[in-house]
Amino acid sequence: SGVTGTVSPAVIIFELTNQLSYMLPVLLAVLLGRASACVNVYIYESMGKSRNLPSFPRITKQSSYERCVSTLMRTGPHDVQCLNRFSSRRDIENSLAETSFDSDPTDFAIVDSLDNKYYLGSVTSIQLLA
C-alpha cells in the first residue's frame, strides 16, 4: 500500500489466502498508512527537529537561476568576465591571461552558456589560480 498508494494489494492478498479474519485490522493499517503518506510531515525529520539534531537545509530554486549576469553583477570599467559551466582548463587559462589584475581580485561569473548567460555562480581569480 505504501508503494502503490492503494488498498488493492491488501484485498488481493485476502482473496488469494481466503483469510478474512484479519481483514479489519489490515485494512485499517493500510488506510492509516495511506493517510499518513498524504501528510507532508516526515517522522524522522520531526523527531530530529524535536531533539535539535542538525539537518540539511531545504533546497529551493533560486530566483537568480533565471536572470542574466548583467543584471546581477556590477560592471566596472570592464565587461563582466564570464566562464561557461563546461569551460576547459585552457579556456580558464585564456580568460585569466586576458584579464588585467588591478588591486582587487577579479570575479568571474559562471554561466549556463555564453549565449544566454544565465547566472549559476561566481568565482574569483585567486580561486582559479590556486
Image: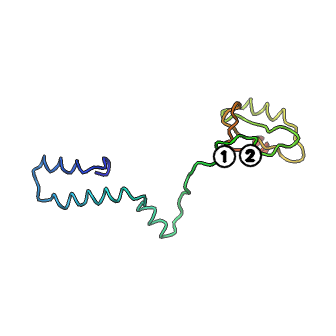
Q: Which quadrant of the structure image shows residue 97?
A: top right
Q: Is residue 66 left or right of residue 36?
A: right
Q: Residues within 10 Å of mark 1 (few under 14, many from 20)?
A: some
| Earlier sequence position, callout 2 versus callout 1 | 1
Kindly identify the amino acid type of the residue bearing the numbered disc 2: Leu
The residue depicted at 54 percent of the width and 57 percent of the height is 56
Residue 129 in the image: x percent, y percent?
A: 78, 41
Between residues 95 and 113, which one lies in front from this camera angle? 113
43 left or right, relative to 6: right
| Count of numbered marks | 2
In percent of the image, x 69 and y 33: which residue is there? 116
Identify the residue position indicated by label 1 in the image: 64
According to the picture, the residue beneath numbered tag 2 turns out to be 72
Look at the image and tell me in which quarter the C terminus lies. Answer: top right
- 73 in relation to 45, above or below: above
- Amino acid carrying label 1: it is Ser
Residue 61 location (% of width, % of height): 58, 48
Instruction: Report x, y in % for residue 45.
Output: 46, 62
| Near-viewer residue (63 or 84) | 63
Q: Outermost residue, left direction?
A: 18
Q: Marks 1 and 2: in contact by CB < 8 Å?
A: yes
Mark 1 element type: helix
* Residue 31: numbered disc: none
Dot 2: element: helix
Direction bottom: furthest residue: 51
Q: Residue at x 26, y 56 (%)?
A: 30
Viewer-nearest residue: 99 or 90: 99
Q: How far apart are the two marked residues, 2 and 1, measured between alpha carbons?
A: 8 Å
